[in-house]
Amino acid sequence: MRLLPLFLLLLAGAAARASDDPFLSGAANHSYNIDCGGAADFTSTFGRLWLADQFFSSGGAAGMVAEPHRFPQPQERTLRFFPPSSVGKSSCYSLPLPPGRYYLRIFSVYDNYDSKARTPSFDVSAAATLVLSFRSPWPEPAARYGAYSDLIFPSATQPASDVCFYSLSTDAPVVASIEVAPVHPLAYDGATTGADLVLVNYGRVTCGNSLFGPGFTKDPDAFARVWQADVDFKNNDRTYDAITAGGRKIFGSNQPPNYFPTKLYESAVTTGGDASNEIEYLMPVDTRLSYMVWLHFAEIDAGIGAAGQRVFDVMLAGENVTRIDIFKQVGGFTAFKWTYVVENLTSSTLSVNLVPVVGRPILCGLENYAMVPLEMRTVPSQVAAMKALKESLKIPARMGWNGDPCAPRAWDAWEGVTCHRGDKGLVITQLDLASQGLKGFITDEISHLKDLVSLNLSYNSLTGSLPPGLGQPSLVSL
């Protein structure tokens, strides 16, 4: 699976209002802005509190981009990198989040911080599910200026939820900032998908407008989303005209559970030139996944005053999926949202076409989310047992015992650990930790490894006695 960060860093100088930004609420609301590699807390020019680097697994090192003067925000200049030679393949930030749904934004940058002139390859997981992949070489703008990636994920583990970075080959994963905030449990069709899917942003676009959103401009979005300008997604072989609401009030925006911002509906694109022209956007996709597409409309042309005056068809991947008459649905100057799930794609580009039926089509915004199925995780009692063993055996950082012991399945399990699929999740069946220089003791929590078949702790310097719990019926080899 190759999921790439989708919007490159664009800078802005206006301040955001605190009441519009859920990331400002702090740990009491389970919101965190982590300046990876940063040594001290600070408040940004946008009024956002950033925390000094914390919650990361042992090992790794702090770094600084090669040309910090090109990054006006402090949290974009510092970074943390995880060399696999000292921290193992997997390193994580363990965020203290109760069960719920969360919006996660990650800023990754290289900017030749290590003077090697080679961007690293690594994967990123959330909720023990592979969600992002960075492959060398990165696109030049992303390598030089950094790139933001964002997603919505469910946290179902206590007391922390892990965001993990997995090294490929000998490359050191790198991250500059992590932001997380809770979202409404019903947001983005959460009633049917919230517990089972991660939604990865493959394009969130404002039409006829420039980039806006908390942390980048003064424009509010109660959901903390950033909306990209559409220049990189629009089929520019076609002719478009931009229109605005002209200061008229927009009704029906900023409502739960999605809190789509009013500014999104104050501008739009329509077709220019011949009346038969179409609006067309081309969105990158991975054909192995399904996509949740959201289209945003508002009839902001005062010349349209009745149903039937502007009607158009929506074509997704060449299929006619619906016919839209905005005024008939909600009237004028009122937000209207429409969503659809696209499946079984055969092209790496998803075409979104608005085809005129009466008048010219209009579009205010577009969102495209990859629907990544939540992967099976290790049985919680066995995760707890393995973390207890990590402490009691004094597992060294170089072994990379971080995150879920067995997931994502695309990665190797923890070093020395073998896993299999069980009835209620992944289970540990073998521990081979011979000759690792271990100097601790065997905790009785090992009794929770109910599926353990083989345990090898030979040629270490362990102390204490064998715990009573080390007698599970499954154990064959000791």
Image (cartoon, helix red, strand yellow):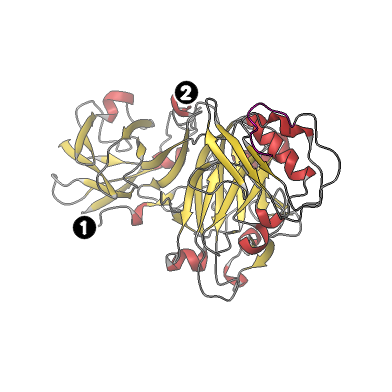
Mark 2: secondary structure: helix
Q: Position of residue 102 (x, y in %)?
A: 57, 36
Query: Which residue type carries mark 2?
Result: Ala
Query: In the picture, residue 465 is in which quadrant?
Result: top right
Tell me: residue 437, above or below residue 143: above
Task: Give coordinates of residue 377: x percent, y percent.
Answer: 55, 35
Q: Indicate the quadrant containing the C terminus: top left, top right, bottom left or bottom right.
A: top right
Residue displayed at 29% across by 50% down? 348
Chief secondary structure of the magenta portion: loop
How many residues crowd around disc 1 within 10 Å: few (fewer than 14), some, or many (20 or more)? few
Magenta span contains residue 471: yes
Give the quadrant of residue 101: top right
Residue 244 within the segment the image draws in magenta = no
Quick one: SS at disc 1?
A: loop
Q: What percent of the width, then of the height, locates residue 127? A: 56, 38
Residue on which the image places disc 2: 191
In depth, the one of 285 and 233 nearer the eye is: 285
Q: Which residue is mark 1?
A: 237
Mark yes or no: residue 41 visible. Answer: yes
**Residue found at the far right of this picture:** 464
Residue most extreme to the front: 477
Q: Quadrant of residue 86?
A: bottom right
Which mark, by number, is residue 120?
none
- On the rendered structure, is 242 left or right of 82? left
* Residue drawn 13% across the image and 44% down it: 276
The part of the chain drawn in magenta is 470-478
Which residue type carries mark 1? Asp
